[in-house]
Image (cartoon, rainbow, N blue to C red):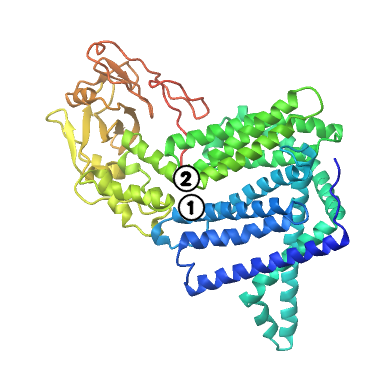
Amino acid sequence: MAEPQAPPGGATNNVGASRLAVGLVQGLALFALSRASQAKAWPATDGPLFAALLLAAAYAPLIALAGLGHLRRLTLALWTLIAAALAALLAACDVASALPQSGRTTPGFAVAAFTATALFIIHHLIAPIDAERRITAPYARYFDAGWLNAAQLGLAIAFTGVFWILLELGASLFGLIGLQGFRTFIHHDWFHFPALAMAFAAAVHLADVRVNLTRGLRTVGLVLLSWLLPVMAAIAVAFLFALPFTGLAPLWRAGSATGIVLSAMAALIVLINASYQDGEHAPATVLRWAARLTAVILVPLAGLAIWGLGLRIGQHGPTPQRIIAAACALVGACYALGYAWAAVRPGRWMRRLEATNIAAALLIVALILALFTPITDPARLAVAGQLARLSSGRVAPAKFDYALLRFGAGRYGLQALQRLAARNRGAVATFAAAALKQDESCRNGGCAPKPAGPVTIAVYPAGASLPGDFLASVGDDVGVCAGGFRCEAYILALPGETGPEVLLRSNPAFVFLYARAGRGGGWTKLGGYEIGDCPAAFAALRAGAAQAAAPGRRDLQVMGARLAFQPNVSFVCPTPASAAGALSMPATAPSAASPPASGRQGPRPSPPPGRGG
């Protein structure tokens, strides 16, 4: 590959002056926006507009700084305008989807970070193409442009930080002799915004003029990173080797398993690329084998991340964070499959890694543009998924995550909560109305809504009554029965049991089994049965027609069909023609490490407890 040459002296001076001018304009723009925010004046009074201007002013000049001297003028002008528009669009969508009462005028950290990622990727797809003057470029061009600019960016940030530290040191020196004017001067926003922006622009230019030194620093950094690959590969192999002995249950109990696994995958991907570099020269043998091994290891790691996230969503439903994690898992799976393909294919070592990197870069950009615009807004998708769980009966009204709708899903969640509260009756409406009255102190679910009113439970069969200590013992489990939902309790007297047991229907589709914990003890929830939308089965329970399905088991026989005693098991309502037949289901629940069963009648695995991750 022909190395890019530094422009001649006159051109270098022109580029340097242009970069300083860009830095000055950026600093003045940020200063003006800061003043508008402090004064509560336009455009700060329009949240989406202010956020759009802020992110565009922060990122578009960086495109100009990186492109000056490297992109043709027309290409640079068009790409800078497009970058400003993309940054403005993502920022405006983020603030527009926030809670109205939040008063937000700045984009969130996730949007700022992912926007920077998308712009960095697009810039380093455009620059090699513009240099080659054709639709594609050699992979070495992409590698050189991306990693070189990453090194320049790091050096410029470090230079700007040191520049400010020196100004503060100078202010402290003057302060020793009682002169505070210098400190006051540098802390004026009309000074530090332009000064820092111009210092950053100067650093970018200095790193670009001394490109050979910058490239040397990049090479040293990549070499050092590449020799960490065998270490991380050994850790990953040991982790996978230990899983059969520990089982997956500890992994799922960690709550943040998916995030940690995805972070490990990201580290491995970076280290593999540090070893591969532009692919023109193969590294040491140990690094080649470590890269091949690590590429294969990425596949089971991606599987673990996707499986754990699926279990978490299956139990607690989607949240915006889990949807973003799902997008990251999809990117991780793309890298894993592509790198494994590159590792096992014959020919020049890992050559197909190059196509994988380009494809993954395009996928990342597409996902960012989709996730942070209304196309697939994570908050909107999370609200739709949570409401689907509620309407289908998969989650009881008392257990539904109203706090997510109130605080964690922006205006989409608030609007959904208002619609739920607008219902005239029912536990869901009561809970939703209570959630709407909560303040920020309840953001993390610390104020579970508890509607007032007497507990209403109809007891069956006719003439039966609840044990006197049942309500006091089960506590919050019957809270929903005070909010308008008509709970039902079915008293069971099964052969072989020491006393009566209680089936409590506190959810439209579930009944839960309670029994005493030892002689004279309190009542304990042992498990439950999922019946679904089957009025005939509930009518049979009211009539006392439930019988033990088998001695020594807690499975029940209802209408000739068998209800397996285990959490989250499906039950298909028998038709009159098939009511005489038995519907057999597995009697034991799979462990958290078991793969999900297929079909409507199969059990669903019990995901890890807790709502995090």
Mark 2 element type: loop
Q: Nearer the viewer, residue 345 or 165?
A: 345
User: Pointer 1: what residue?
Assistant: 93
The residue lying toward the viewer, choosing from 396 and 457, is 396
Give left or right: position of 86 versus 580. right
Q: Position of residue 187 (x, y in %)?
A: 64, 77
Closer to viewer: mark 1 or mark 2: 1
Q: Residue at x 21, y 29 (%)?
A: 491
Residue 463: image quadrant is: top left
Q: In the rendered image, which quarter is residue 427 located in?
A: top left
Res 328 → quadrant? top right
Dot 1: within a 10 Å radius of its alpha carbon, few (fewer than 14), some, or many (20 or more) residues?
many
Which residue is under mark 2? 377
Image quadrant where one finds the N terminus:
top right
Whole-percent x and y of residue 588? 42, 22
- Residue furthest to the front in view is 74
Looking at the image, the residue that sits furthest to the left is 463
Task: Classify mark 1: helix, strand or loop.
Answer: helix
- Residue 513 drawn above or below residue 418: above
Up/down of 337 relative to 456, above or below: above
Residue 414 seen from this side: yes
> Is residue 241 at least partly visible in the picture?
no
Q: Residue at x 77, y 63 (%)?
A: 203
- For label 2, count other residues whose C-alpha is less than 10 Å away and answer few (under 14), some (14-19) or many (20+): many
Is tag 1's residue or tag 2's residue first in the polypeptide sequence?
A: 1
Mark 1 and mark 2 in contact? Answer it, CB < 8 Å.
yes
**Residue type pointed to by label 2:** Asp
Which x, y percent locates residue 57? 60, 62
- Whole-number angstrom distance, CA of label 1 to CA of label 2: 9 Å
Residue 396 placement, left or right of 78: left
Q: Nearer the viewer, residue 67 or 222?
A: 67
Amino acid type, callout 1? Cys
